[in-house]
Amino acid sequence: MLPTDGLDLIRQDSGRFDRRFPIGPVEWPHFDLLWIHEGQVALSIAGAATELAVTAPGGVLLLPATTFEGRASKAHAEASICHFRLPGDWPTGHLLPRPQEALTLQTMVALSLRLAGQGAPLARRIRLVAAIIDGFGAPHDGPATNTPVDRAWRQAAERLDRIRGLVDVAAQVGQSESAFRAAHRAQRGTSAGAELISLRLATAERLLVTTALPLADIAQAVGYGHAETFSHAFLRGRGIRPGAWRRAQRPFA
């Protein structure tokens, strides 16, 4: 985690990258927080062994004097930048956001852009940027486990459009629904049914923020048969309809 005392905010901006307008090559004398709100970019960063693919919601925090360049992987990518200084001597390199916090960080970055556009007090904007930076660094989670319950949920996340219920989740690891419910409860101490709803809604949140897909397509992608069923489930789980949530979260709308 970077110490943020003495943070000096230089510039915040947003825009679109496409194949005609690549990123860099460039090397800044300050920190550069590059956040991808929609689409994907491929980045070549000095000192990194391989090219880095950054998919929305996601970003990279480039340390001072780190040379990088990139391009949109598809037609275009919506992105924002935040340039800032911190006192001290820093090595070159980059940091990545903790995966579990990416969607929350995207919301914070969007708020930060809005505050900058509204001319909000600088002290408030600096506090928010410091909180965003706190989301970058090596994850503190332990190594992923590989129990049947863990495998079932990982596979379900990859094929959520074909998961109609817990019986489908359980079948991926050769278990009955009742046996899977019991194993899930024993391992995680929570309801497997609630876990499936949470997975559907979290995936829907990501798609609402990072794509322009119609609600009917998102409903299908997360395993709901109809847009209205999805809308009611989202309202119950999040207290707001998905269309309104999307409008509130997207900084480029």
Image (tube, helix red, strand yellow):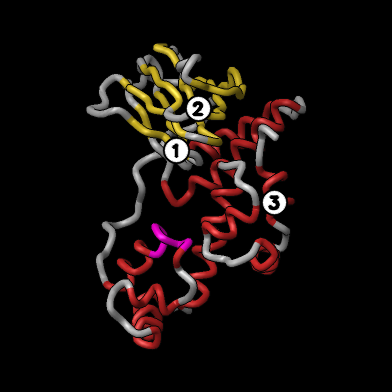
How many angstroms separate mark 1 from mark 2 (CA)? 13 Å
Q: Earlier in the sequence, mark 3 or mark 2?
A: 2
Residue 49, compared with residue 178, is above or below; it is above
Residue at 68%, 55% in the rendered image: 242
Residue sticking out furthest to the bottom:
178
From the image, tell me which residue sits under label 2: 75
Q: Secondary structure at mark 3?
A: helix
Magenta-highlighted stretch: main secondary structure?
A: helix
Q: Earlier in the sequence, mark 1 or mark 2?
A: 1
Q: Amino acid at mark 2?
A: Ala
Residue 132, compared with residue 43, is above or below; it is below
Which numbered tag is attached to residue 245?
3
Closer to the camera in the image, 49 or 218: 218
Q: Quadrant of the C terminus?
A: top right
Closer to the camera in the image, 213 or 65: 213
Residue 115 percent location from the top left of the image: 71, 31
Q: Is residue 170 left or right of residue 11?
A: left
Residue at 57%, 33% in the rendered image: 129
Residue 129, compared with residue 65, is above or below; it is below
From the image, tell me which residue sits under label 1: 55
Residue at 45%, 68% in the rendered image: 163
Q: Amino acid at mark 3?
A: Trp
Q: Secondary structure at mark 1?
A: strand
How many angstroms separate mark 1 from mark 3 (CA)? 21 Å
Magenta segment: 156-161
Q: Quadrant of the N terminus?
A: top left
Q: Is residue 139 left or right of residue 23?
A: left
Residue 130 percent location from the top left of the image: 55, 35
Closer to the camera in the image, 53 or 120: 53
